[in-house]
Structures are given as C-alpha cells and as structure tokens.
Amino acid sequence: MEPRHDTPQPTRRRLLLAASALCLPGWYPLPASAGQLDPRLLAIRLEARIEAYIESLRRVGAIPADERTAWSVYDLTLDHKLVSINEAQPFQSASMIKPFIALAFFYRHRDDPGRFPYDEIHRERLEAMIRHSNNKATNYFIDLLSQRSGQALEVEQLLKSRNPEVFRETRIVERIPYNGRTYRNLASARDYSRFLYTLWHDGFPHSRDLKALMQLPNRDRFRSEVLADVEVYDKTGSTARLCGDMGILVGRDGAGQRYPYIFVAMIEKDHRSLEYGSWAKHRGSVIRQVSAMVYQELKTVHRLA
C-alpha cells in the first residue's frame, strides 16, 4: 500500500473492513434522494480504490520501487477531504510551481502597482508562464521578484509571509535552468490543495485573473473521454523525474449546477528517466486513469451529467 501520513494506515484499513462488512452507526449512506454518501465513507472507498490501482501497477512493474506517488482530492461542495496519500511529503514541483510565482507577482502588484504594473506586457508573460509553461517568462518573474537579494528564495519568503498556513512544505530556491532540469524547487500535494482551496474562494489578490489563466486551454493530465465536458483550472509539471498536475475540476449536473473539486497528482522518480518522453506519457496516463476514478465516484454522489 502507499504510505499515508495524515491518518494512520491501520486505522483506515480497519474502518474500510468494518464499513464494508457492517452497517455501523455513522457510516450509513445518505438517502438516495440526497444524492450523496456519507463523505467519510466516500473518502475511505475512493482512497482504497486509488491505492489498489497503484499497487496493481507496482505488482507488474509498471511503477517500480524507485518511484513514489502523491494524491490529494478535496470535494469543495461537500467541503471534505476525500483522498490524502503522501500528501505532506514535498515532491519536485517542476512547472507546477508557476502559479505560486504568479501569485507572488500579484502580491507585489497590490503593494506597489507603480513598480510592479499589471499591464499588457505582464499579462502576456503571465499567460506564457502558466498556459505555455514558458521557462523564460518564469525566470523573468523570479528575477523581478528577487531584486533585493537576487535569490529565488525571496519568492518563497514573500509567499510564506502572506500565507504561512498555505505554503508550509514549499521551497522555491532556483530559477529554471537553461536545460529545463529544475529539481530543487519543492512543494507538497497538501500545499497545492490549500493553494487551490484559497484560490477557488478568491482568497488571494487577483484570484479571478489567476483562475482565468489556469483555465486557458492546455494539455492537462486530468481530462479523458470520461471527463470531456468538465471545466479544468490547472497547471501541469514534468521533468525526467516528475510527472504531475494540480487543479480544480468542475462537473455539472443535469440542471447545470456546478460541483467543483480539487485534484492533485504527482509521480516522482528517484533518478532521471533515460526515456523521458515515454516515461512522462505513461505516468500521465496513470494520472488520467485515477482522475477518471475520482470523477466516476463524484458523478454518482452528485449525479453529474
């Protein structure tokens, strides 16, 4: 099984067995008319499905022992954490760190709009950084935000000074190298989840602008035929050691009611893959499969179209 840190593994296993074998008080599904299950039971079932899937890949060598995974799912309608697997462990952030850098820029703009204007040039560079994952644009903002010390750490310090409750396991210590091999910047699935939760509730300066940037069409790792009509606000990240995506997905029921949820997925390898393209493609497919599992569960719960 994938190790977990927020909840002891034996407790979750015992609860799963008990819930499946007995109708324990507090673990009954809600009436069918409510269209929901008890979120605690849903969380146990969904996390068990993901763990079983990853374990099946490990048994056949599709995910070897030198790779670890992290998964986080938060239902914003139920206001409940559904999946927390390796959620507190820092992983390489790769390009998934870029929305954090955009947020740091928006903080500087709010504090000093004359020195940090949110003008057409900066809008275009933000889009290049978020939508097209342009490393040159990313380094432009890191340099712009690090003029006092010249160190990327200044971006991290700014974020942690404004939102210490969000960026607990985040480390921003390097610009993007010329070869794109950025391995030292780190963040946890839990930090991404807290960031996305705050972003969805417009808790940051220019939250709506940042959501608009993250919603622009891109090659996300969440959607498949199962999720063809789902709204996605996301940022992918990949290196020869990391394949991931973090975002907010929004399904709709037959009446058009929106049901948003946070999904964070990361697969990290101890050493660089010698076949980066095929490795990243396969791990992206794993993430899409788990994304489909999550959506199928929530489709039943919320009666999504």
Image: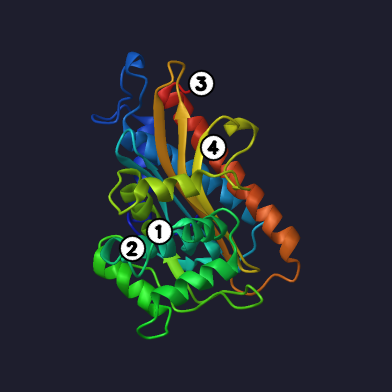
Q: Which mark is residue 118?
A: 1
Numbered disc total: 4
Q: Between marks 4 and 2, how big is the CA–CA gap?
A: 40 Å
> For the point 66% across and 68% down, which residue is it?
240
Describe the element under mark 3 as helix, strand or loop.
loop
Please name the amino acid that badge 1 sits on. Tyr
- The tag earlier along the polypeptide, 4 or 1, is 1
Residue 11 in the image, given as x and y percentages of width and height: 32, 50
Mark nearest the camera among 2 and 3 is: 2
Left/right placement of residue 304 relative to residue 29 reads right
Q: Quadrant of residue 157?
A: bottom left
> For the point 40% across and 56% down, which residue is it?
192
Pointer 3: what residue? 305
- The tag earlier along the polypeptide, 1 or 2, is 2
Mark nearest the camera among 4 and 2 is: 2
* Residue 224 in the image: above or below residue 70: above
> For the point 50% across and 35% down, which residue is it?
231
Pointer 4: what residue? 293
- The tag earlier along the polypeptide, 4 or 2, is 2
Please name the amino acid that badge 2 sits on. His
* Residue 153 in the image: above or below residue 51: below
Q: Which mark is residue 109?
A: 2
Q: Residues within 10 Å of mark 2 (few under 14, many from 20)?
A: some
Do callouts 1 and 2 mark residues in contact (Cβ within 8 Å)? Answer: yes
